[in-house]
Amino acid sequence: MAFLRKPHLWLALMLVLLVELMLRTPASALLQSGGSHTGRSLQLQSALRARGERLNVITIGSSIAEYGVDHEALGEALRAQGLEYASLAMPGGHLLTMRTLTRYAQEQLPELRAAVVLIALTEFESIGNGSYELAIAQPWLRIGDHRWVSEHVPLDRAEPSTLGSISALAGYRHHAQFLTRSPKRLAKALKWWRRPSIDERLWVTGRSSDSLCGMDTSSLAACLDPTRPLDQNLTSVATANTARATCTHMHIDGGQGDWRGHDLEAESPIFRRMRELRQQQLRELPSHAPPLLVLMPVHPLWEQERLAVGVRDWVTQIHAPLVARGEIRMLDLSRMFEGPGMRTCEYFRDMYHLNHAGQALATAAIKTALWEQLQIPHK
Amino acid sequence: MLFNSWHFLGFVLVVLALDALLFRHVRARRMMLLVASYYFYAQWNWQYLGLIGFTTLLDFHVGQRMREAGHPGRWLALSLTLNLGILAVFKYADFVIRSANAGIGWMAPEWQWDTLDLLLPIGISFYTFQSISYTVDRYRGQIEPRRSLLDYALFLAFFPHLVAGPIVRASEFFHELDLRHRCTSREGQLAIALIVLGLAKKMIGADSLAEFVDPIFAAPGAATPIAAWLGMYAYAFQIYFDFSGYTDVAIGLAALFGIRFPQNFNYPYLATSVQEFWRRWHMTLSRWLRDYLYISLGGSRRGPTRTAVNLFLTMLLGGLWHGASWNFVLWGALHGSYLVLERIAMAAFPGFYASRHRGVLLLRWLLVLHLVCFAWLLFRSPDLATCAQLLRRMAELFTLGPQLVSETRSMTGLILILLFLHWRFGRSPLHERLADAGPLRYAGVIGGVLIAIVLLTPSHVTPFIYFRF
């Protein structure tokens, strides 16, 4: 092994180690670029670094939160009350992301008065989004976090993507692959000094005026049927394709389970862990007022044909004790578009997310609850 | 245990440490390497260790007795019959049964035989050919019998080349083993470079290209004509990266134990004749086929017609060696036809083939590249119908024109870059340059490639293509 006495191999390994360490420091912000999950996390981090300590109100959640609220309007309304607001919504985020953001809030947001957590029924069937979520959480992770990160994404030797639970370098895989698939994206990413405006990132709102009323989403079979007519005045082809793609996944993921009468926590430790993590994270949010948990609407087809029957009881089982003890407040908007006289399709841009009309109604409802939470008188 | 797995990395580190400890103790070291090799194989299927054991005992004994007991031809026949018999049962029996069932099915549907459904022992094609080379060399008097069963067992089972080659001759292996050569500093650097670059070829190159190629071969009807063409080129690089990447790792690993393996790939897509392609692609198999099949059939000593027949038969059987399906038979036949037609063309147009003019070389290179790529369609397609459907899609390019979308545009660019790199490194292989590089340059390249492996490998570890053969 004479070559081991020479520096060549050791220097190569040190280079790998150096990059691993660099990605755990603020230097990683140089890699920020829109589009990829990691890039968006880096942008948010950078924006929060500039303004974080003055924040008074935040929203946390996945893309359901990003598209579910008009963050710009909410931010302006709060500013009129002398309060600083930011959306910490991260598309693809789940329990791991929320855990990292909870820690961030504990350490960096001393002026936080209220936290709004937006979730949907679709987020209660699993404990996370798998290794996919590592790409979102990575910029927020530190050395020593791997123990609890592994609770969300266990290391699987056969899947390089799960290496991200112990290695920052591997945590950037999604970002690297996103960029290298398109030379244009790569070129754009290299112009790292062209950062998006801070306000843009903190109040980013997914906007769409498209609705699902131009296609038949009354059942999974109808949604998947390509022969059904499409009214392009109401639903664009792109929107219809996105909706159909989700319907395909719903179909592939299998039939509807039935959780009624089951003791889920006794049947699987995953459910117990899910409840513990949810409750723990909500309790640990360091806002002055109890966090406001909003159960956001998703397209009714989910409950009708895909989500387990009894998922609502499970959600109640997790949160009711916290509500009873006054540790959180809960606002259930999950059926806000299903009442009499409502045309559900008018409020959705796809099977998960609200369009502009849905956003406006949801924002108004959230604002009312938040104003109560902050004890701001309604005008 | 795949070369591209954590399990294998740990295994290699332990074996290298033990090798360093036992280096001065010849028998103990060889015993340790044999046990490690059997452990490596047993991780896949310990029961099939018995097959390697049988082949080892058989050919070791045949090698000993062949000259001493007289009738060397009978001993050779015994070795060939049993070795090829085992190969036939495990690899080809179901193919023959299925073909027979299909052949007589239309005449007498009630005459159907059940297939054996045996699990194909990994590496059987490789270690069987190596063992046959020893008995044939003994028969020809080209090698002395090996007196140590331990050495012979190690020759067949040495883990770096056990499952997918390179196919090493007994004389080469024993020569290296007897040298008791300790890996020098330069050789160590070269070996590590080969291993790291080999893994990158497989994990970044082959596995990423597979993400583009697999859907095209799975549903050729859904591919656009340009995507079908790109799928063909991409597969050519995928299989090259996959197999040459494996070989690089195998050669690098063996070098760390002081054993030099022969080169197996030499930038095959630079070839300007099909003959040259086979001198650059899977070189140890080409050499085996030439020495033990083509020459045994009479080679080129019996006139041009017989030479053509011998060439064709050699390639046909070479195709069948790869796998038990009509695709591989036809792939071998196609390459056999290429070689025969090329010999005829060489005789008819000697100027064209002797010319060193750049334009002529470019034309020949393009011709050979496309002949090889078209043959890969047969190799990769799950069945002949898929291959035909792909060819039809590709033909539509000339009627519909190219419909470049962003994905196919990126792939076109990638394939051009890969061809350029193939040409660039073919002139001066990167690993050889790294062997003499200074520490900073070496660390920059190897460290950079390691980082790229972590960042750019697809999410699932996939086995090497040639493990199937």
Image (cartoon, rainbow, N blue to C red):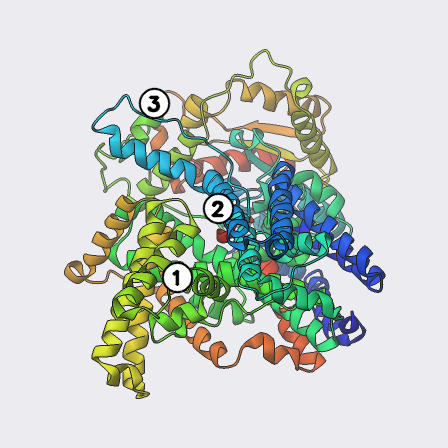
Query: Residue tagged by mark 2?
Result: B84
Query: Residue tagged by mark 1?
Result: B236
Of circles 2 and 1, the one toward us is 2
Residue at horizontal 24 percent and vertical 72 percent from the top: B344
Residue A208, above or below A119: below
The residue lying furthest to the top in this view is A261
| Identity, as a three-letter code, of the amino acid under mark 3 | Gly
Looking at the image, residue A186 sits to the left or right of residue A264; the answer is left
Query: Residue tagged by mark 3?
Result: A341
| Identity, as a three-letter code, of the amino acid under mark 2 | Leu
Q: Quadrant of residue A240?
A: top left
Disc 2 packing (10 Å; few <14; some 14–19; many ≥20): some
The residue lying furthest to the bottom in this view is B357
Q: Can I make out residue A21 in this image?
A: yes
Kind of element beneath mark 2: helix
Looking at the image, residue A216 sits to the left or right of residue A364; the answer is left
> Residue A132, how many percent across, how many down?
56, 46
| Identity, as a three-letter code, of the amino acid under mark 1 | Ala
Q: Are marks 2 and 3 on the same chain?
A: no
